[in-house]
Image (cartoon, grey):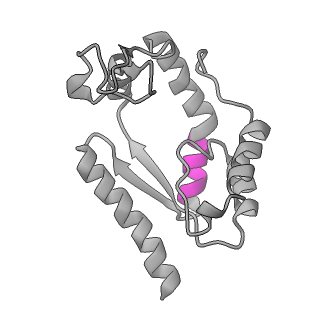
Amino acid sequence: MERGELIADAMMTEIVAARLQEPDVRAGFVLDGFPRTVEQANTLDGLVAERRDLIAIELAVPESAIICRLSQRRVCSQCGRTAEPASSHEAVCPCGGALRQRADDNETTIRERLRTYERATRPLVDFSRQRRSLHAIDGTQTPDLVTAQIARAIEAVFERTES
């Protein structure tokens, strides 16, 4: 992660497969950051063959905004919580832990993660678009608007499968 690389497909798939066996995911689940490759997506299809349709959500954000956001991000050293952007200039989390910049949130590593995304994950976006399971959302909107659009995309799957 510190070099901006992805975890190996086999390891990520093993982690997700084990998690999807837990009882609390029977009614549904959200995966953040998985799948990241077409190979992972094909494996996920097999893992969830008996469930509702899958959807993929792409939060579209310009590269310059990603670099700005991540280079300013602060995380609590005690609880791991990410600080709200307005409070990231403060040095202490509400839990009392110190807010620190992650070691991998520097411009060099961020740019490498973006190159990795283009090489490994962009094909997944195209794959999902061809399957008509992709919902692109403007990630530069307010968090409330982004959340509402994600909720609408998920609700549409439930409406379609219940009809």
Give the left or right position of residue 33, taking residue 159 as reference.
Answer: right
Pinpoint residue 53: horizontal percent, then vertical percent. 58, 70
Quadrant of the rendered image containing residue 34: top right
Identify the residue at image location x=60%, y=61%: 24
Give the left or right position of residue 140, taking residue 160 as reference.
Answer: left
Q: Give the residue furthest to the bottom.
A: 163
Relative to residue 10, is residue 113 depicted above or below? above
Identify the residue at image location x=59%, y=73%: 52
Q: Give the residue furthest to the front.
A: 96
Q: Give the residue furthest to the left.
A: 86
Relative to residue 52, is residue 43 depicted above or below? above
> What secondary structure prevails in the magenta region?
helix
Pinpoint residue 107: horizontal percent, then vertical percent. 43, 12
Chain part drawn in magenta: 122-129
Relative to residue 10, is residue 70 depicted above or below? above
Relative to residue 67, is residue 106 depicted above or below? above
Identify the residue at image location x=43%, y=80%: 159
Give the left or right position of residue 42, taking residue 63 as reference.
Answer: right
Whether residue 163 is in magenta: the answer is no
Residue toward you, 110 or 126: 110
Pinpoint residue 2: horizontal percent, then vertical percent. 59, 16
Whether residue 123 is in magenta: the answer is yes
Residue toward you, 139 or 84: 84
Quadrant of the rendered image containing residue 101: top left
Q: Quadrant of the N terminus?
A: top right
Pinpoint residue 162: horizontal percent, then vertical percent. 50, 85
Residue toward you, 57 or 63: 57
Identify the residue at image location x=72%, y=43%: 15
